Amino acid sequence: MKVLVILHLFYEDQLAWFLDKIANIHGCEWDLLVTGPAVSEASAALVRAFRPDTRFLACENVGYDVWPFLHAFQTVSPDDYDWILKLHTKSNTGKHKIRINGTHLKGFMWRDILVDALLESPARWQEVLDACRQSDCGMVCSRKLYAKLNFKEDNDLLDDELRRIGLTTDERRFCVGTMFLLRSSLLKALPLQNFRAEQFPRESASNSGGSLAHVYERVLSLLAPSRGYKVYTTGSDAAYERKLRIRRITKPVLEFLFSIDRKGEDGRKYLTLLGIQIPL
């Protein structure tokens, strides 16, 4: 088994933390590719001391971490690797809390949960390897951040793009934050050579507005189910599993009482009140 680790390095002060996590990789052949707008000499030296044969790819910091990832495969063939481990530095949210999939995140928690689900320890990496050796596995990511699609680009823009590139799936979940281990052959479904930096946003775009970067954050997670593979998830603890069980019981009841959701092929919004669906 051969793995390509792609690390998009924008916040260089996080480099040592990431190298410490990547050091937990074992039991397979692997290469390291670092993308970034302008990696400093000090950071490059640190990476080469860690992995002398590391490749560096200069890449504009547009489209968040998505364009650099797609750009990497304009220079690397998916046929050269069995699996792709996608990682990227991520900003500190400070004291501001973000709620995803029932988990409240602040500071570096979002980054840490995504990475630790894959690379928390040698034992965790072994768990990930065991999952990807299953013939039906197409992707491995954090269970806590494998969430339901729920924004505008998850419907209109996403579905338009899926139709354009010929992907079909009933799966409506994705890895929020795009750090995962992906079966490399799945990337062949994408028109990789057609992507250009100018197609992606240079500044932050809101979820409600949508952007090609946000759409492909979701498309990347949908590659596996679109080709008949499963997404395996890791990184949850006993307390989180209990919370999930409670949510599975209470969520249908709450949605019956009151909820707003998009339904049907046109993604129209409906208000559900006491089981009665009212189009909005």
Image (cartoon, rainbow, N blue to C red):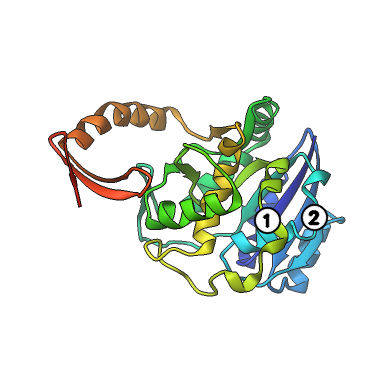
- Residue 238 sits above or below residue 272 on the image: above
- Residue 184 sits above or below residue 151 on the image: above
Left or right: residue 249 compared with residue 208: left
Q: Residues within 10 Å of mark 2 (few under 14, many from 20)?
A: few
Label 1: element kind = loop
Provide the residue designation for mark 2: 76
Specify the label residue 228 is tagged with.
none
Q: Which x, y percent locates residue 17?
A: 63, 54
Q: Of 7 and 208, which appears nearest the observer?
A: 208
The answer to which quarter of the image holds residue 96 is: bottom left
Provide the residue designation for mark 1: 191
Question: What amino acid is at disc 1?
Answer: Pro
The residue positioned 68% from the left and 25% from the top of the image is 135
Q: Is residue 201 visible?
A: yes
The residue positioned 67% from the left and 26% from the top of the image is 130
Q: Is residue 8 visible?
A: no
Q: Which x, y percent locates residue 19?
A: 70, 53
Is tag 1's residue or tag 2's residue first in the polypeptide sequence?
2
Question: What amino acid is at disc 2?
Answer: Val
Q: CA distance from mark 1 to mark 2?
A: 14 Å
Name the mark nearer the viewer: 1 or 2. Answer: 1
